[in-house]
Image: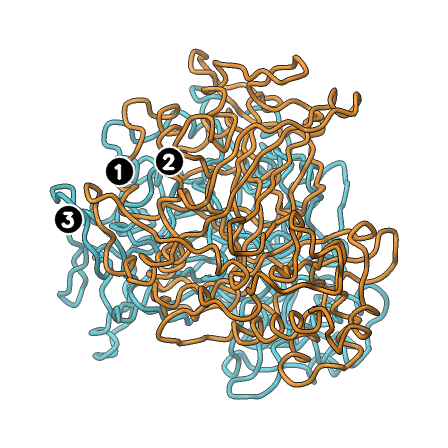
Chain colours: A orange, B cyan
Amino acid sequence: MTTIEKTAQSTMHVLNETHNPSLKSWVISANNSSCDFPIQNLPFAIFKQKGSEEAFRGGVAIGDQIIDLAALANKKHFKGKVQEALVACAKDQLNDFMAMGKLAWSELRSALSKALTEGAAEQAVIADCLISQNNAVYALPCNIGDYTDFYTSINHATSVGKKFRPDNPLLPNYKWIPIGYHGRSSSIDVSGQTFKRPKGQTKAPTAEVPSFGPCKRLDYELEIGIFIGSGNVLGEPVSINNAEDHVFGICLFNDWSARDIQGWEYQPLGPFLSKSFASTISPWIVTTEALAPYRKKWTRDQADPQPMPYLESELNRDVGSFDIQLQVLLETEKMRAQSQAAVQLSQSNFQDSYWTVAQMVAHHTVNGCNLKPGDMFGSGTQSGPNPEEAGSLLELSNAGSEPISLPNGETRTFLEDGDNVIMKGWCQKEGAARIGFGEVSATILPAE
Amino acid sequence: MTTIEKTAQSTMHVLNETHNPSLKSWVISANNSSCDFPIQNLPFAIFKQKGSEEAFRGGVAIGDQIIDLAALANKKHFKGKVQEALVACAKDQLNDFMAMGKLAWSELRSALSKALTEGAAEQAVIADCLISQNNAVYALPCNIGDYTDFYTSINHATSVGKKFRPDNPLLPNYKWIPIGYHGRSSSIDVSGQTFKRPKGQTKAPTAEVPSFGPCKRLDYELEIGIFIGSGNVLGEPVSINNAEDHVFGICLFNDWSARDIQGWEYQPLGPFLSKSFASTISPWIVTTEALAPYRKKWTRDQADPQPMPYLESELNRDVGSFDIQLQVLLETEKMRAQSQAAVQLSQSNFQDSYWTVAQMVAHHTVNGCNLKPGDMFGSGTQSGPNPEEAGSLLELSNAGSEPISLPNGETRTFLEDGDNVIMKGWCQKEGAARIGFGEVSATILPAE
């Protein structure tokens, strides 16, 4: 199933006609400048209609609609690789489509872009396959075989490090290695997830022995999720120069964390039950190709160690970073009861990441580890350089010592039952279309 | 796909007619007292005939033969749940069979036991489905969704802890928590695996900065692999009393480790690339039911903390441990060239584990984490109480400072290219049939 592509250099950053900001769609809702899903975006999800007995299948967002890719495949309007891609997208997971590789992803994107453009001859064919996003429910976009969580925000690593290891916040390996660890894939679910507050062992610093009970320091983590498209064979590392050809796309990711459970369990082998009770992703995967207008230079401070050769390339220096704005909002039970809008807790940007997506891929495979289509990376909590830009409550409340005041008079150190955490992400600038990620939201239920 | 079983108490330890040591099979090779696969064992694998274009499918070992379960399903000789189980076993992975739950596993075992017994009416039907193990190649027994590695040998944890943290070998949480961490499932392969020595970042204690190159401290880890059969729903912990009903069976497991890569990367989030380059399992899964005669009391020293209630039960005290003898052998390239037999490096026993399988399951799910059919646990390196019973070279060579002398004049601190590491496991005692695990072997290729 895995397609290996050996290109000299990744081309995911190259602009083409699909990125043209002046493109307009005959799907009118897509032309609103605040829309997350204009014709330049075209993200993928797995969906079905609410309350229906239909099978889940692939869809592409356009404005407030979804193109039902199974219905479109059935029309047999398209030919060749585009039709093959549609057939792959008609399944209840996108793994097979992801495995087809970047040429297939790009050809389907190009064909849909043309067919959705104002005046396209294909309007009638596509219009017949549109379903309103209001009527949709989503499933995981793919079977996530392995999930790896990185730790790429140096701002987060430093401020969290202070709380776990006050004397030694940033460990000596941080600036050399894109630190990551294996995560639990079974407990990843899609936006809308509800989950019970986890129980577990914790030990207060002053306690003689640990105790057992519901987590008292439940937190979110503002991350992005990175989906592997085409994989690599065990024993064959992916070079940094073509790393991004293996990356299908990006979603929003809330990597819930039980800080008190983590503090007691994580030595010496890393976080375990503090992470595996729930992790939530947004339904839409924005393709790496769609993000091409939002690539930025990646730089490293001269005073810092420069990357080892396997983590270094001109391409990565030139366009390695992604300018993705990220936001966390909180809606408490009280706010819901009083129909108050969710309030923003913080904003940050993925471009502040110390390590790039290409470096994550190159590092992950340098030992020969094989990536498979549908594998997911978490970026690690993305905290900006300023304290108010932190991507977790651990940071915002200074480990629970400084409660945050909410506009309605409530306060928070960590999350409470009934809290709904919402994360949004988007790319926006002059001269390019807005590329939105939609949102990921999930709600905490009381422990049993 | 997942079947949830809510029994008051696990019954996997209960003896029945299939365990009767006096049973003999009409497959004569199964009646040899040194055979790993007598009629009392009946382990499962996924296999096909060497060099054939056939699909992989399920098989059960008997003596030196394999019952081709796809062929047997096609015969439609059996009815009801047994036939349903055979149909599930006819696929190229055992996940669906595992998901059917303990009643299905047990009924198929019982039916095969009867059909293989001397004088059985089914002899002709089964005989028609036998394939010699000499003609078989194996694949992974199932799609391993998530792999978790535990750290259950206190002897291993203490002696390894000394090398990484001389001042603090056994961390304060060890005797409270069955410590585990998420592992990489994509790089798990079946016995016979060859893999290139991994490359990566390492840093000598005296070096200013890290360097990059092939691992210099490549090691094996003598573990068992534990396969989850029926899963649990996210948010619904499995109680220790019925934990074993979720355990399909056990195999041998070599969790290769790059000690120098691990030493530099593992803080603060645990081992990552030091583990994900290769992990090797034996092809045959011995069912928990087959191991019933080899259950032992699990005890804990009065001076140690007693387990928290979710890790404690009378059943676990009575029969929580498994008496499984484990052995590591090394065959170097030189030995192969000179047709010398592999030499034993150490032996240990899984009954020395500080934590039981039931405790691993109860702990893993206590936060609500969902296990799925086919998920695998590693037991962690099983080192016995005496230094010569250590399950890794890190321990046997005292972190590389005391080379081991091999009978042919070679020495080893860590593994060298061309080394083939072989692990064997078996249960044996008076009054019960020998239950063997076969072996897991894999060979190290030079770094590229």
Position of B359 with respect to B412 (left or right) is right
The relative height of residue B27 versus residue A358 in the rendered view (above or below) is below
Name the residue that disc number 2 marks. Answer: A268
- Residue at the spot 45% in from the left edge and 52% down from the top edge: A322
Q: Chain of mark 3?
A: B
Name the residue that disc number 1 marks. Answer: B164
Q: Does any portion of residue B434 appear in the rendered image?
A: no
Position of B96 with respect to B183 (left or right) is right
User: Are the residues flagged by discs 1 and 2 from a single subunit?
Assistant: no
- Residue at the spot 67% in from the left edge and 34% down from the top edge: B239
Give x and y (percent) for residue B122.
77, 77
Alpha-carbon span between mark 1 and mark 2: 10 Å
Name the residue that disc number 3 marks. Answer: B402
Dot 3: what SS? loop
> Quarter of the image holding residue A29?
bottom right
Pointer 3: residues within 10 angstroms few (<14), some, or many (20+)?
A: some
Asked whether A181 or A360 is in front, the reply is: A360
Question: Are discs 1 and 2 less than 8 Å apart at CB?
Answer: yes
- Residue at the spot 24% in from the left edge and 68% down from the top edge: B417
Pointer 2: residues within 10 angstroms few (<14), some, or many (20+)?
A: many
User: Are the residues flagged by discs 3 and 2 from a single subunit?
Assistant: no
Dot 2: what SS? loop
